[in-house]
Image (cartoon, helix red, strand yellow):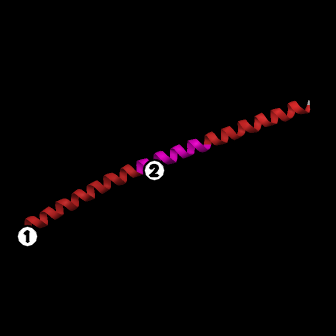
Amino acid sequence: MRKHSESLVESSNGITEQTGKAGQAFGRQVDNLMSSAAKAEETAKQLEEAHDKAHTGRLLEDAT
């Protein structure tokens, strides 16, 4: 019975360790996704500004 209990404790410790590693990996993935999302948002803002400038330039050309 004691060996069985020790085996269960070892298995539980292994599961806890693997769960911790998976949690850390998940956290890194979330951080990477958030970073990518922030970069995409900045790129979208830059594209919108460039589009607005181009549109304004066309309006000025048409007015002259």
Residue 51 lies, in percent from the top left, at 73, 37
- Look at label 2 and name its amino acid: Val
Question: Which residue is at a point 13% across and 62% down the rendered structure image?
Answer: 7
* N-term mark: 2 or 1: 1
Which residue position holds label 2?
30
Residue situated in front as seen by the camera: 61 or 14: 61
Classify 50 as above or below 7: above
In which quarter of the view is residue 54 placed? top right
Helix, strand or loop at label 2? It is helix
The amino acid type found where label 1 is placed reads Met
Whether 24 is drawn above or below 6: the answer is above
Residue lying at the far right of the rendered structure: 64
Where is residue 40 shown, x and y percent of the image?
Answer: 58, 42
Alpha carbon of mark 2 to alpha carbon of mark 1: how far? Answer: 43 Å
Verify whether residue 29 appears in magenta.
Answer: yes
Q: Position of residue 49 (x, y in %)?
A: 71, 39
Residue at image point 45% right, 50% down: 30
Whole-percent x and y of residue 11? 19, 60
Q: For the residue carrying disc 1, how many other residues have a C-alpha within 10 Å: few (<14), some (14-19), or many (20+)?
A: few
Q: State the extent of the magenta-drawn residues as a range.
A: 27-41
**In the displayed structure image, the side of residue 48 where residue 29 appears, left or right:** left
Give the camera-side residue of 63 and 17: 63
Question: Chief secondary structure of the magenta span?
Answer: helix
Marker disc for residue 1: 1
